[in-house]
Image (cartoon, rainbow, N blue to C red):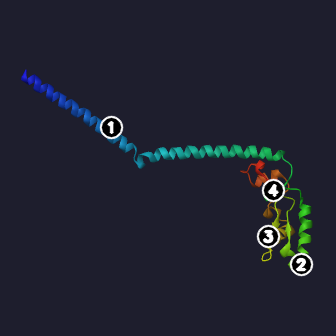
Amino acid sequence: MNKLKENKILLTVIGFGIVIVGILLMMLHQQKQNTPAAQESSYSASVKASSSSQSVQDTNNEAAYAKKAAKMKGHVFNDYYTTWTKQDFREWAEKYNRLSEAERHQASCNFGTSQTTSNDNMNTTPLDLIAGSIVKNDFKTIGYFETVKEYNQSFKGVDPDTIKK
């Protein structure tokens, strides 16, 4: 009977020991999974999936924007709709280039948009650059596009609805 009690106590101690060791091993395994090295592969997979998803979304947006731009009418100058044509820009450049130096410092123009570009007393560069590009027939440098479709071809990721009026 004494031996039976001793064996029960011994078996109980061994049972508790196995349970405690099992719990410690599970805690150690959980800690190992939370290390940066263990999470790196999961993070990499997540980044790749996100990047792939964003790329597909960008491609879909570009296609939708191109369709939308093809249907839209108007000219675009520096992200604004403009009423001016290339000929209007050429005529303005000719008039601007005939201005005296003093007149150039006071010059300003809205180019058919709701935004005005101006020179000041110290600097004539803003309008000088625009006039120079027009004379060289380099309209893309100044941000002029004859159609919304042409604008969209240069800025594929931009929704044409965001062009300001």
> Mark 3 falls on what kind of element?
helix
Q: CA distance from mark 4 to mark 1?
A: 63 Å
The residue carrying pointer 3 sits among few (fewer than 14), some (14 to 19) or many (20 or more) residues within 10 Å by Cα, namely few
Mark nearer the N terminus (4 vs 3): 4
Q: Position of residue 39 (x, y in %)?
A: 44, 46
Please name the amino acid that badge 2 sits on: Ser
Please name the amino acid that badge 4 sits on: Tyr
Q: CA distance from mark 1 to mark 2?
A: 85 Å
Above or below: residue 146 compared with residue 118: above
Residue 155 falls in which quadrant of the image? bottom right
Pick the residue in front: 85 or 53.
85
Instruction: Report the residue marked by disc 3.
Output: 126
Residue most extreme to the bottom: 101
Pick the residue in front: 146 or 97.
97
Q: Position of residue 2 (x, y in %)?
A: 7, 23
Above or below: residue 72 compared with residue 17: below
Instruction: Report the residue marked by disc 1.
Output: 26
Instruction: Report the residue marked by disc 2.
Output: 100
Q: Position of residue 78 (x, y in %)?
A: 79, 59
Mark nearer the N terminus (4 vs 1): 1
Left or right for 95, reference 114 = right
